[in-house]
Every structure is written in C-alpha cells, then in structure tokens.
Amino acid sequence: MGQPGFFDLAERLEAISAKGDPLEALKAIVPFESFRAEIEAVVRLAPEERKSNAGRKPFDAVMMFKVLVLQTLYNLADEQVEYQIRDRLSFMRFLGLGLEDTVPDATTVWLFREALAKAGLVKSLFERFNQHLDAKGYIARGGQIVDATIVNAPKQHNTREENEAIKAGKTPEGWDEEPAKNAQKDKDARWTKKNDQSFYGYKNHVSVDRKHKIIRRYTETDASVHDSQKLDEVLDKSNTSNEVWADSAYRSAEMEAKLKEQGYKSRIHRRVPATILSLSASRRPTPRARECAPVSNTYLRIRKTAWAASSCVRSGWRVRP
C-alpha cells in the first residue's frame, strides 16, 4: 500500500467525474439554494426561541435537504444513507462535505424529515425538485416502470397483547407513561411474506420514467400492502407515453381493465407457471423483463448494501402518519 498523497482525493474525484457522476450533473441542474428560505423557516429556531447558543452548530439546511434527495434517488433508509455518505466520495461531494467533516447520523436525518413533514413540506419540495428537472429537459417520457420494494425495519420485541393493540391502531397499555420507550417503538411497520420468506417493515412504491430513469411519483406503506393496491397513486399522468411496465404482481383482469379505461397501454408481465418453462427459457430475459431491469437492479444493489451494513429503519421520504 502506497503513501497517501496530497492530491489523491482530488484525483479520485476527477476519476469519478470522468466515469460520469450523475450526482455532479444533478447538482449543476437543480438550484438547491432556491429551497433554503422555505426549509430554514421550518427547521431553524428563531433567536428568541433558543435556550442557549452553546452546543453543536446545526447542519446546513440545504445540505440536509440533499440528504433526503439521496435517500429518494437511491431508496435508502436513514441508517443506510448515513453509512453511504461515509462510504462514498460521490455522496460527500454532492453534499459539500470533506473527509474531516461531521456526517449527520440517522437520528438527525429522521428529525429533519419529521420537521418538514409536520410543516407539510415534503411533498411540495419533492414536486418542485422534479419541476426543476423538467425545466432542464428531463421530462418524463418513454413510458413508466412501476415497482415496489420492501424496506426492512428492526423487529419489535413486544408481547402478544401489545402487538394486538398496535394492529388495532391503539397505543399499548402503559406506553404513554413511558415516553422514551414509546418514542423508540415502531408502531407503523408490519409483517409480510415474499418467496416464502417473512419480512418486517415498510414498502416503497415508485414510478420511474423509462427515458431518464428518474423516480417521478412514489408513495409509502407498511410492508403488508400488496404492490398493486398503490398502482393508481404512483402512475405519472405527465409521461409523454401511455405505456406502463411492471412485474406480474400487478397483473389482474381488473387492473388491465382499469389501465385501459384510463388510457394506458399495459406492458405488465404475464404470470407463467414455472412448470411449463424449461430451465434455459426461464433464464432468458423477456423484453418486458429487460424494461423493468433498471428499477429491479437498483433495488438489488440496495438490498446487498443493507445486508452488508446495518439494518434499515425506514425509507428516505417516509413520514409517520
């Protein structure tokens, strides 16, 4: 291993740029400073409300908003985005952080997003972000790819009675008297099964345009909600094409009729019994499978990262009800 040089970091970043860093292009396209006043009005305390000027200086509001953008683009949970910022030079450059700078932890990210959510800003900021992309020619076109992915949450160690109360939408007895315990309990996550495996957490439902592979619409639910139940909410009517691509989880006679009624052309995968496929045929990607690959591959990278690092808590733009 060679000795670190004075210009090593700059040369590494230049190499990343040469390969085509999408975050560098995004930073040049979106005027992030235009979001500052609106965000700071929510997350910054007025001087008269501050108890003291002591303590750590708060993180820059625009930088924190960029953290939420990273979470949305890469579908990262709070703990995962903290890990990825520490690990990836491209993320650090996008946020304007140096190797010596402090990285916001998962709790800080969650508190920042909660402040925006309580003020009703999350959706409007996301929409404005996409408007800036549209203005630069990144209009949703070529049809849309719809998909959903599970975001794991830490399993809760509750009694049967506590779980029954949570499922009924109630706070278990005694939790209100223990604010610290109540705040740490995740009462929104749910169990689901996929490929005979059980998962506990949430589900991200997204629509990505085929041309630019940018997430145009999204919604979040607990993991128990079926993918197809949120199709209407994520369909992007602004897309220049009426084609909708999705995997077979979305296919049903009712869904096909609904899409046709709304003027969409379904490219949703058909369910094919595995018993009638030969091994070679089952491995051969169909045209529709190739179209859905950008979303699926993104989710695959996220899952690999999650296994290697800490467990996911919740998705980037998710807010508590």
Image: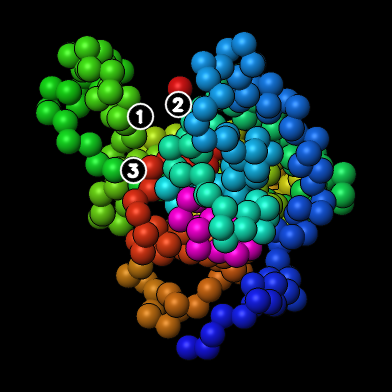
Left or right position of 92 against 143: left
Quarter of the picture holding the C terminus: top left
Q: CA distance from mark 1 to mark 3?
A: 10 Å
How packed mark 1 is, by other alpha carbons closer than 10 Å (few <14, some 14-19, many 20 or more), is some
The residue furthest bottom is 1
Viewer-proximal residue among 94 and 55: 55
Q: Which residue is rendered at x = 28% and y = 23% of the image?
A: 180
Q: Position of residue 254 (x, y in %)?
A: 52, 38
The residue under label 1 is: 188
The overriding secondary structure of the stretch rendered in magenta is helix
Q: Position of residue 196 (x, y in %)?
A: 25, 55
Q: Residue 159 occupies which quadrant of the picture?
A: top left
Give the residues in magenta. 81-92
Left or right position of 207 against 240: left
Q: Which residue is rendered at x = 13% and y = 22% of the image?
A: 161
How packed mark 3 is, by other alpha carbons closer than 10 Å (few <14, some 14-19, many 20 or more), is many
Q: Position of residue 120 (x, y in %)?
A: 62, 21
